[in-house]
Image: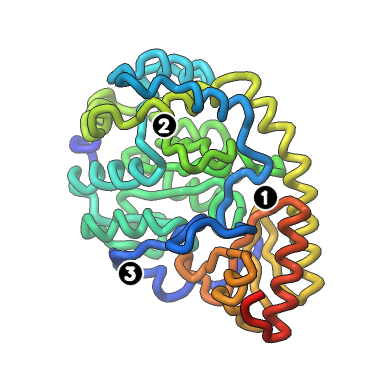
Amino acid sequence: MALNAARTRRPVPAPSRAGAGHATATGARSHGGPDARGPADWDFSTNANACGPCPHAWARVQAAARTRYPDPTYQALRERLARLHGVPPGRILMAASGSEWIMRWTAWCARGGLRRVWLPPHGYGDYAHAAALWGLRRVRQPQQAQLAWLCDPGSPLGQPEDPAVAAALLADPCRPVALDLAYAPLRLHDDTGLHDTMRERVWQLWSPNKALGLTGVRAAYVVAPLQADAADVAALDAMAPSWPLGADGVALLHAWTDDATQGWLRATLPTLQRWKADLVALLTRRGWRCQPSVTPFVCARPPHPIDAEALRAHGVKLRDAASFGLPGWWRLSAQPPQALAALDAALAAVQAGEGEP
């Protein structure tokens, strides 16, 4: 139906009060990865696959035809992505990035007159930012929402989506629901809160650059719901700029559909699982409280407040989870043994009160 024609989780920390009521748009948004000081020597703040970059995908990106425009319809790429997901090409929409789609989909819902939004209690800040820009009100109960975002698994906690929340949101077939699957390819355990029938009901957002260790290449795509109205799909497609994907993005998504890329990704998961176990063991030994997760990243709280700038001076960067509504907590990704040793040394030095190394 066209939008304009219709109108027992694991224990986690309690949401901060900032998570309720109206979303607030701010000029500064928090992200992991490099900052104004450049890349960190040992970066635990980004969730990119630490085994990457994927050699096959990286080779495709390097060989990208940057001297000419891509096909503005992306027909060949849509067909490849459609085969990967077993859907008709008409259900595939291109996006410049996951963040671009968040802004576009929110704008489409708001233009359709929807005003009450459900967001994950702890989630990526762009959901709330986009909602605030369009004057949407964040609701406390899924049943109160006119549109919603789900994540499976989510960040920063790396836990599966709550099936009860998903079922409540999908009880109304006219309620548009988007599902962020950025971390689904990095799932370390077969533990999902959404079965296939649920997925067919939502707008599935895929952004594989994290899974491939190539976060600098911005590219994403969406699988429209099985029963999506063709007018809705066309409207969302029309809201994109011309050529949302450049040559690098096209190359990345082409590589994503290749068996070599998918095989490499599967082969990295046992390594990431070992590195994550080592990370949790180190943090636990130092008195940190670690939340369970099904991803190669964890959310953890130190026994005492830590000085992020002091750690940065030792070449180590973590992701402060305050912007996720979890003040006092930090998100850390699984990293190779050398990085883990650097983290251990930096934590010891900061605890001892050392300054610049």
Look at mark 1 in the image and give the residue it sits on: 296
Label 2 – label 1 distance at C-alpha: 23 Å
Look at mark 2 in the image and give the residue it sits on: 221
x, y percentage for residue 288? 72, 73
x, y percentage for residue 86? 52, 18
Choose mark 2 or mark 3, whichever is in front.
2
Q: Residue at x 25, y 44 (%)?
A: 109
Question: Is label 2 in a helix, a strand or a loop?
Answer: strand
Badge 1 vs badge 3, beta-carbon distance below 8 Å: no
Q: Earlier in the sequence, mark 2 or mark 1?
A: 2
Determine whether 326 is above or below 44 in the image: below
Choose mark 1 or mark 3, whichever is in front.
1
Label 2 – label 3 distance at C-alpha: 30 Å
Q: Residue at x 55, y 46 (%)?
A: 152
Q: Earlier in the sequence, mark 1 or mark 3?
A: 3
Question: Which residue type does callout 1 highlight?
Answer: Pro
Question: Which residue type does callout 3 highlight?
Answer: Gly
Question: Which residue type does callout 2 highlight?
Answer: Tyr
Question: Is label 1 in a helix, a strand or a loop?
Answer: loop
Please state which of residues 310 and 327 is positioned toward the viewer in this rendering: 310
Picture quarter with the N terminus: top left
Q: Which mark is residue 21?
A: 3
x, y percentage for residue 206? 47, 36
Q: Residue at x 42, y 75 (%)?
A: 17
Tell me the quarter of the picture where residue 332 sits: bottom right
